[in-house]
Amino acid sequence: MNLRQLSFAVLTFAISTAAVAHDYRVGDISVDHPYARATVAGQTSGGAYLTLENKGNSADTLISAKSPVAASVEIHTMSMTADHVMRMREVGTLEIKAKEKIAMQPGDGYHIMLIGLKSPLKVGDKLPLTLTFKKAGKIETSIFVEDGKKKSEETDSMEHHHH
């Protein structure tokens, strides 16, 4: 491979990586890979997932989330009870301690609930999501709609760590 081909390969990789990576930052808060699973016609709600990391030395709090694709957006938690019943509830706000990372993933832990969807979420859609933090302020992100099957296979094989 000559220098020209190598330069082209490096540039192509850099562009493709930038196109795939979708992370955001406001103040000490980093928001990584916001995504949602595709929904079907008639489904009125959906979940969005992302990773929040507080790189600062003091706690901050996610106080709200909004998106024009849904009538309302809530911060939820899911957990399995001792009698094997999945429970989901709105938490209102989510504290992110100093140096803490919270991975929102399907099936357990936190997620963003999109309630009253105005249309189905289709694979390939890019949806606006505004997150507001108590200290860091507002950040405009984009949720990428992905194939739910593919994502659940990936998360099933990953080790989960929830806060």
Image (tube, rainbow, N blue to C red):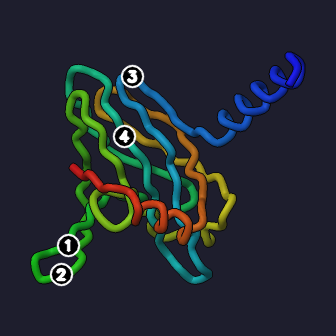
Instruction: Give the residue number, with chain letter if any, for mark 1.
Output: 80
Location of residue 40 in the rendering, given as x and y in whole percent from the top left corner: 59, 79
Location of residue 71 in the rendering, given as x and y in whole percent from the top left corner: 49, 64
Mark 4 → mark 3, Cα distance in angstroms: 12 Å
**Viewer can see residue 79:** yes
Mark 2 → mark 3, Cα distance in angstroms: 39 Å
Instruction: Give the residue number, with chain letter if any, for mark 3.
Output: 27
Q: Do the residues labelled 2 and 3 touch (CB within 8 Å)?
A: no
Eye-nearest disc, 2 or 3: 2
Q: Nearer the viewer, residue 95 or 15?
A: 15
Mark 1 → mark 2, Cα distance in angstroms: 6 Å
| Up/down of 91 relative to 11, above or below | below
Amino acid type, callout 1: Met
Mark 4 surroundings: few (<14), some (14-19) or many (≥20) residues within 10 A: many
Residue ID at (30%, 38%): 101
Q: In this view, does 155 lie to the left or right of 84?
A: right
Q: Are marks 1 and 2 in contact (CB under 8 Å)?
A: yes
Eye-nearest disc, 2 or 4: 2
Earlier in the chain: of badge 2 and badge 3, it is 3
Q: Residue 52 carries which label?
A: 4
Q: In this view, does 29 lie to the left or right of 41?
A: left
Amino acid type, callout 2: His
Instruction: Give the residue number, with chain letter if any, for mark 2.
Output: 84
